[in-house]
């Protein structure tokens, strides 16, 4: 579940200094802070930080700044030191995802999880020979499963800003699945298995800048960690485009200045707009220098997508199918006695099934607010609403259910989570999937008392939704443009993306869709402005 980030303004150290005269508590908390100087920080600036018992986390000579940890009680004292030009908080950044596949490679279609390759016309670009060959298309995110069949051949290396080494891989860690999913959309390998990405001929360099050490389903990192990873991708590996499916509600001038510097040196940065359904962009998407991307649900703004002034483009972000760490994806579906199959979304942390699924009679458990007394040995049908998904499934389990089908109480899909790896009593969750409202109502009207089969099969691919899923579509198209125009600047590529985009809102620019949805074949074939 996404943690709430308060959208408060940046507080400069000079402003904090007004309270510096107050007595410090005996155990003052430490803050993540950026400190800016008049020149690249050297020995004198490092000594100044040490004078106040601060710890240097990262150095950004590109923008004359240090990222430090410092006692809150000493922030004001440091602010008054000669040579300190500014200070600001080092805000948190988070992954911006909301939290079925056959064994052969899925063919993109408007009705399946690869529909984004159709609506962005990436498949048309591929048919015309544009695949991103020779371009370094990069991702700053959680760690990556570099052994994944749709990642391995394109993965060339990277950096870990969490562990401070050159290994961003996390194998099949389910709590860092986000980066593998994003990378697959940008440039998943076209190899006859699973999925493939928008720029499947490009080279992947990856930076791990977010992590989930508490295993609570929320991957996050500080802005300085994100900056450190992005800086390595641009300066050490020569990335032409960097995807950032992450964000937070607080601006950082230090962060913005670094991205200006990297863009001027030839790297295009793309970021997700945010998932708060508000008329305000998250940062870094909110910086003018960054290409910001909202999410669509089949050519209309997704219900969760943020938008606003400065938004640049939009792209598919609902039920996008991509790679996930091996074995952590789910193929979820429901099959009725007559053989009809309905695609579903797996509930996060739900129990898995074999390829045969679990079959039993279907029973209506209403909204699941109490133990379902007649569910023993059956599959419980439960409507969304009133209590959490975890409470609903726990109540079904209390009644003896062997599986659960959740259905939405409004139009659109739902991506439920059970919150924890195990149920409250310590047992494993039973297989649980979710279908749209219309499918749930149809099951209730036509199939109660009949045998249904729930499938929740472990796979290496999975569906996900969020502006996190939209941004990598744009990054992939940008990689195609860089490949077809090797000498292009980030500004030229951005202009091509906008000028060739498909308009989705009112004529011209608007703050929900920006300049529209990128059209990969038109963009790759366009003349440089």
Image: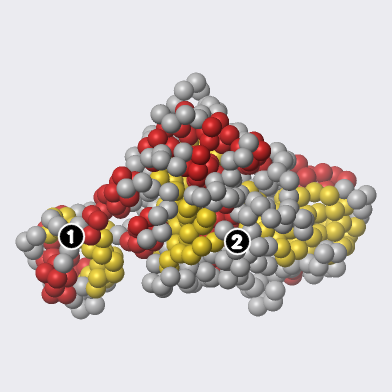
For mark 1, what is the residue?
Answer: 40
> Foreground residue, 462 or 135?
135
Q: Is residue 120 shown to the viewer in this render?
A: no
In-image side of 452 versus 67 (left or right):
right
Residue at the top extreme, as displayed:
507
Instruction: Name the residue: 52% across, 69% down.
Output: 169
Residue 504 picture quarter: top right
At 84% from the left and 68% from the top, the residue drawn is 376
Calculate the distance from the C-alpha at mark 2 to the C-alpha at mark 1.
Answer: 39 Å
Residue on which disc 2 sits: 153
- View extreme (left): residue: 82
Q: Nearer the viewer, residue 439 or 345?
A: 345
Task: Tell me the SS state at disc 2.
Answer: loop
> Residue 481: x, y in percent?
49, 39
Q: Secondary structure at mark 1?
A: loop
- Residue for point 58% across, 34% down: 521
Residue 525 versus residue 184: which sits nearer the camera? 525
For label 1, count other residues whose C-alpha is less than 10 Å away and answer few (under 14), some (14-19) or many (20+): some
Which circle's residue, 2 or 1, is located before the other in the chain?
Answer: 1
Residue 294, x across and y down, in percent = 49, 40
Question: Is residue 332 toward the left or the right of residue 253 in the image?
Answer: right
Residue 201 makes an appearance in the image: yes
- Where residue 263 sits: x, y (%)? 34, 46
For this view, does 83 lie left or right of residue 504? Answer: left
Looking at the image, residue 208 lies above or below residue 491: below
Give the total number of marks visible in the rendering: 2
Q: Residue at x 43, y 70 (%)?
A: 166
Res. 312 mark: none
């Amino acid at each position: 579940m996404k943690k709430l980030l308060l959208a408060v303004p940046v507080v400069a150290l000079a402003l904090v200094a007004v309270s510096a005269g107050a007595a410090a508590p005996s155990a003052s908390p430490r803050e993540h802070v950026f400190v800016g100087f008049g020149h690249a920080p050297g020995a004198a600036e490092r000594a100044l930080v040490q004078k106040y018992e601060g710890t240097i986390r990262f150095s950004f000579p590109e923008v004359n700044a240090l990222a430090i940890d410092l006692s809150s009680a000493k922030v004001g004292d440091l602010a008054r030191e000669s040579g300190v030009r500014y200070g600001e908080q080092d805000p948190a950044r988070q992954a911006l995802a909301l939290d079925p596949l056959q064994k052969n490679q899925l063919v993109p279609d408007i009705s399946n999880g690869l529909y984004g390759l159709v609506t962005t016309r990436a498949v048309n670009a591929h048919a015309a020979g544009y695949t991103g060959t020779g371009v370094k298309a990069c991702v700053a995110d959680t760690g990556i499963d570099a052994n994944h069949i749709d990642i391995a051949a394109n993965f060339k290396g990277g950096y870990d800003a969490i562990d401070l080494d050159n290994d961003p891989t996390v194998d099949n860690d389910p709590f860092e699945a986000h980066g593998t999913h994003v990378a697959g959309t940008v440039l998943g390998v076209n190899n006859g298995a699973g999925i493939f990405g928008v720029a499947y001929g490009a080279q992947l360099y990856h930076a791990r800048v977010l992590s989930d050490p508490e295993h609570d389903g929320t991957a996050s990192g500080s802005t300085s960690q994100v900056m450190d990873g992005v800086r390595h991708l641009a300066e050490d590996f020569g990335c032409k485009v960097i995807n950032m499916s992450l964000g937070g509600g607080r601006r950082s001038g230090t962060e913005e200045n670094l991205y200006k510097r990297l863009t001027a040196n030839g790297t295009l940065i793309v970021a997700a707009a945010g998932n708060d359904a508000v008329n305000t962009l998250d940062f870094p998407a909110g910086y003018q220098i960054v290409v910001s991307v909202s999410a669509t649900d089949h050519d209309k703004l997704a219900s969760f997508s943020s938008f606003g002034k400065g938004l640049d483009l939009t792209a598919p972000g609902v039920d996008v199918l991509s790679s996930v760490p091996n074995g952590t994806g789910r193929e979820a579906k429901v099959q009725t006695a007559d053989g009809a199959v309905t695609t579903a979304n797996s509930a996060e942390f739900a129990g898995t099934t074999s390829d045969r699924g679990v079959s039993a009679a279907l029973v209506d458990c209403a909204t699941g607010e109490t133990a379902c007394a007649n569910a023993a040995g059956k599959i419980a049908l439960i409507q969304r609403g009133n209590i959490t998904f975890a409470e609903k499934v726990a109540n079904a389990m209390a009644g003896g259910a062997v599986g659960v089908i959740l259905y939405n109480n409004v139009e659109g899909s739902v991506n439920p989570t059970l919150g924890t790896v195990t149920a409250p009593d310590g047992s494993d969750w039973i297989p649980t999937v979710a279908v749209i409202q219309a499918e749930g109502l149809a099951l209730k009207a036509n199939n109660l008392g009949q045998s249904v089969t729930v499938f929740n099969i472990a796979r290496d691919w999975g569906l996900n939704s969020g502006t996190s899923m939209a941004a990598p579509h744009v990054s992939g198209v940008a990689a195609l443009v860089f490949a077809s125009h090797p000498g292009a600047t980030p500004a030229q590529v951005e202009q091509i993306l906008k000028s060739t985009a498909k308009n989705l809102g009112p004529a011209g620019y608007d703050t929900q869709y920006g300049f529209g949805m990128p059209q990969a074949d038109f963009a790759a074939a366009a003349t440089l402005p």
